[in-house]
Image (cartoon, rainbow, N blue to C red):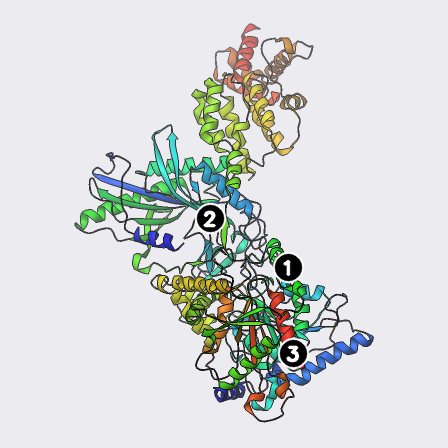
Amino acid sequence: MFVRRVVVRSCNFRHFHDLRAYKEDPRWPGWQVIVGIETHAQIKSRRKLFSDSLTSHPDDPPNTKVSPFDAAFPGTLPKLNSKCVDLALRTAIALKCSVASRCSFDRKHYFYSDLPSGYQITQQYAPLASNGELEIKLQDIPSFKVRIKQIQLEQDTAKSTFHPRTSTSKIDLNRAGTGLMEIVSEPDLRSPEEAGAYVRTLQSVLRAMGSSDGNMELGSLRCDVNVSVNKKGNPPGTRCEIKNLNSVRFMMAAIIHEIRRQSEFLLANPGQSVPQETRGFDENTFETFRLRSKEDAPDYRYMPDPNLGVLVLSKARVEGIQRDLPALPWETRARLLEKYPKLTSKEKSLDVLLNVDNGREVGYDGEDSGGAIPVLTHELLGQLAARKESFSANPLTSEQFGELIDLVQNGTITGTSGKYILRHMLSNPSSRRPREIATELQLVALSSTPSPTSASSSSPTSELHALCKSAIADLPSEVAALRTGNKNVLNKIVGHVMRKSRGRADAVAVKALVEKIVTGE
Amino acid sequence: MRTNVARQLNQISTFHSHPSKLLEIRLGGQNSRPSGRTQSTWRDRRNCIIANNSSVNAFTHISQLPPPSIKGSLSGLSVAVKDNIATSFLPTTCSSAMLQDFASPFDATAVQLLQKSGADIVGKTNCDEFGMGSLNVHSIHGPVVNPFDVSERRSAGGSSGGSAAAVAAGMCDAALGTDTGGSVRLPASYCGVVGLKPSYGLISRWGVISYADSLDCVGILASDVDTVKRVFDSVALYDPRDPTSAPVDIRKVTSEHVDTKIHSRGSILTGLRFGIPQEYFPSEMSPEVLQHTRNVITLLQSQGAVVVPISLPSTSYALSCYYVLASAEASSNLARYDGVQYGTYVPPPPGTDITKTSRVYAVSRSAGFGPEVQKRILLGTYALSADAFDNYFLQAQKVRQLIKDDFDRVFGVPNYFSDSHSRRVDNADTSSQVDHKSDLSSYVQDVLTVPASLAGLPAISIPTNRTAGQAMGEGSSEDRWPIGVSIVGQWGTDSVVMAVASALEGLQRE
C-alpha cells in the first residue's frame, strides 16, 4: 500500500505513449481529441455491498430498503458481500484484467447529504483488478482496443432530490450502499463515436456476465468522461472531467461540446492551457458547464478502512470463476453467425438480441422468409419496456419465442396475430406452446388458397371466402362504386374484412379475393 | 497534577451541580413487577445506585427491564454498560450532546450475550465523550467522582470512569467499558478495581460506537479477577457481524497452545517468565508507585516466577503514533454525526450559505461535540489531508508495526493473529507494566497503556495496595489512594493474563 501511493503520486503528470495513430476528423481539423471514461456500474446482486439490505429497484418506495448500516447508525459495521466480489471478478476476467491476490478498501471522505456516514468505502490504494483490455468491434466503426486501467469495488450513494421552492433536499437511502464497480479506462478513445462504441460494448459485456443491467436511463450505469484536445503533434492538453452522464447520446454530445469549447479556448489564448475543471452537462442546452476548478477540488482524506482489512483472493477462487464464465457477447455472436450464416443479413436484430442479457438462448431455425425476427424482437422489447419488466424476468421461454417466430415465418399466423399472441403470453404466463394458443384464440391465418392442413369443412379458405362475401353484402354502395371502376373503395371493403377476421387475414390476399368476387359476379 | 485534577473536577461540577438530576429514574413504571426475592434484589440494586449516584455520578440511566428470566452463567450478577455501547432499551448517549436523545434500534452483541447468560443489566454508565479522555471529565453528564473518597472530588479516571466507579462503589458486580488507548485500565487503576482489555477482536464490536475501530476493544471491570473472567467467558465469542472478530480457528489454535504450554504446568507463576520493559519507567513516575511495582516483582519471584529485564525500543514513539492513528480514525468515524438521520440537529442561523452541505452540518457539529472531541477531529482531519498523510498517518502506521514487532520479539507465545510471526525470538512469556494515577499529565500517563492497544494485546490492571487503605475515607496519607499494575500478554493469552492477575490477587490477600 505504501509503495502504491507513491507510484500514484508520481504519475500525476501524465507520461503519454500514444498507441493510436492520429486521424484527421473533418469536424475539427488539426485537433487531436483524447478521451478516457470512468464507468460506474451497479452490481446486480440481491443484497448490498456491505449490508444485509436487499438491493433496491428504482420503483421501490423511498427508504424501504435500508438497514441501520446503510443509514450509518452508530455501532454498525460493514460486512463484505462475497457475491458482489464474484460478479466484479467475472467482469474483471471478461475485461482481461489481472486480478490482485490481495486488495483492500479505503474511505473517501466528504460531507454531502447523500452520504450518511460522511465517507464512501472504495478501493483507492489497492483495487480488485487492473491492466485489462476491451476490443471494440462494431459495424459502423473501425475496430480498436481500449486499455482498462483498473476495476474497483465501491458503495453507491443515497439519492437526494432538491426542491428549489422550499430550499430543502429529500433523501432516499434505498440506493445507499449498493455495490458498484468502477471501471476506469486509459485515455485511449479518440472521438465521441469511439466513446459511444466503448460504452455500448462495455454494456454488452456487463449484461453477458450478469454483473450489471448496465442501464444508463435507469441509473445502473453512469459515466464520467475525461476530455482533452491538443494540436496535432503536440503533447496532450489539460483534461476536463464531465461528471454524471446518464445516456450514451448525452455523453457524446458532452464530448462534442467540450472539444469545441476547449479548441476555441486554445485558439483564443495562445500559449495557455485549458484550465483543469470538473464540469457538468446541461441536458437542455447540450452544453457543459463549470462545477469546480482544480483549486476547489476537495481533499478526500483517503484512509484505509480499519474494519475491512485485506481481501485475499485465492487462485482457486479466481480460476473457478474463470471456468464458469458465461459466454462473452462476441463469442456468442461468432457462434450464431457460424451456425446460421443467413443471420449475417440481420445483424442489427442479432445485436439487439445480444444486448438483452440472455439473447443467446433464443433458438432460431435459420429460415429466411420475411421480417419476423426484427418485428417480434422489437415488439417483445417494447412490450417489456412498457410493462417495466426486464428481459431476464420475462415469462417467455426461448423455445416459446422461437416457435412464435417460426409460426409467423411459415404463414401459420400473421405478423399482427404474432404480436397479439406475444402480448397475450406476457400477460398470461404459462408453459403452453404458441401454436396451441393461436388455435385456441382462433388466430390461425385465413389462407386464400386451399392447403393440406386446412382442408376441413370449416377450412380457413372457405371462412375467408365467407367473410368477403358478407362484407360485399354489408357494403352495397361501396360495391356499386367499385363496379363503376372506383378502386379507392376497395380499401374500405378490405378493412371491413380485416376487422371481421381479427387480424387473421392477409390484406393482399383479401384484396385479390374481393376483387375477384366482385368482378367475377 | 493530583491537585490539578481535583480542581478541574470542582470547576466542572459548578456547571453540573446536580448531576444526578440527569438520571432518568422511573422505577416500576409500566413494566411487569418482579416478584418475591428476585424483586427485592432487583429493587435493592436500583435503590443502591440511586443512593450512591448523587455523589459519584457513575450512572447516566437506570434500566427498568424486569429481572432476567434466563438462567445462565451470569445469573445473579448485576452488570452496568458503558454509555457508548448500544442498547435498545436505554438511551445510548456517548456522553455527547450530539447523541443526547439517541436510542439505538438494536442491542450490541456484548449486551445480547450478557442477557443470554442471565445477567441483570442495571443501567448505562458515564464516560468521556465518545471515549475520548483519560479522566472522565469530558461528559455532558458531568464528571465522575472517584468513590474512594468522594469528599476529595478526585477523578475516577477515564474514559470508562463511570463503569470503574460503579464497580468500586458497589453499585454493580461488573461493568462493560471500552478501551482504545487505556480507557478501561486507567479508571480501574484509579478506582482500585480490576480492569481487563482483552485481545483485539475477541469481544464483538457490533453495537460499540466507534472511536477508533482498529484500536477499540470492549473491556470488563469488576472488583475481582474471577468475576472479570466469568463475564469474559460469556461475551468473548466469535461474531459474524464484526468483520474484525477473530475467527473460531484462530481462537482455537491459540487456546490449545496456551493450554498445553502454560495452564498444564500446575501453579501458574512457577517458572513463568516475566519481562520488565525498561522503557516503562518514565522520569515522571513517583517513588511510591515505583515501590509498589517493586513489591509486586518481589512477590512474583517469591512464587518461582522468572523476572527478566527486557527492552521494547519503540515505546517512546507509541504515544505520538497512537494520537495520530486514533484521531485520524475518530475524524472519519465521527463524520456521520450530521443531524440528518439521527442525533442532534441545530438549524443554521439565517444568512448561512446553505448551498454548501458542510456549512449546514458545521452548525450541528459545532454545537453537538465538546472541545476534546473537536480537538481530536481537527487533529485527525489534518493527519489525513493530502499534504500530511505521508508524514503523519503512514508514518504512524509504520511505527505501529514496529511496536507490534517489539512485543512479538519478546513473547514466547507466537502471535497467531498477526500477519507475520516469523521473526519471533523465545525470550519471555509475559511482560508486566505499571499503571499509576499521579504525577503525569492526562496524556503522558497513556504512555504505559497505548503500546498494548497498538499491538492489540490483552492487558489487565489490578490494584496493588488494596490491603493498605482499602476502607473508604480513612486515613490521610497520599498512598492510601489506589495504584494499579498491568500484566500484558501475547495476543490471545487472555486466560494466562487473568490467571496471573488472579494469583497476584490471592497473594496480596494473604
Is residue B338 in view from this perspective? no
Q: Which residue is drawn at 68% across and 23% down?
A: A440
Q: Which of marks 3 and 2 is in front?
A: 3
Q: Which residue is drawn at 50% across and 36% down?
A: A322
Amino acid marked by disc 2: Arg
Residues B21 and A434: in front is B21
**Residue at the spot of label 3:** B507
Spatial distance from mark 2 to mark 1, Cα to Cα?
A: 34 Å
**Residue at the spot of label 2:** A102
Spatial distance from mark 3 to mark 1, Cα to Cα?
A: 25 Å
**Residue at the spot of label 1:** B260
Where does the image place residue B97, in percent across and percent down from the top left?
53, 74
Label 2, residues with CA under 10 Å away: few <14, some 14-19, many ≥20: some
Is residue B139 in view from this perspective? yes
Name which of mark 3 and mark 1 comes first in the sequence: 1
In the rendered structure, are the residues bearing label 3 and label 2 in contact, judged by CB atoms less than 8 Å apart? no
Residue at the limit of the structure toward the top, as seen here: A520
In the rendered structure, are the residues bearing label 3 and label 1 in contact, judged by CB atoms less than 8 Å apart? no
* Chain identifier of the residue bearing label 3 in the image: B
* Chain identifier of the residue bearing label 1 in the image: B
In the depicted structure, whether residue A302 falls above or below residue A38: below
Q: Nearer the viewer, mark 2 or mark 1?
A: 1
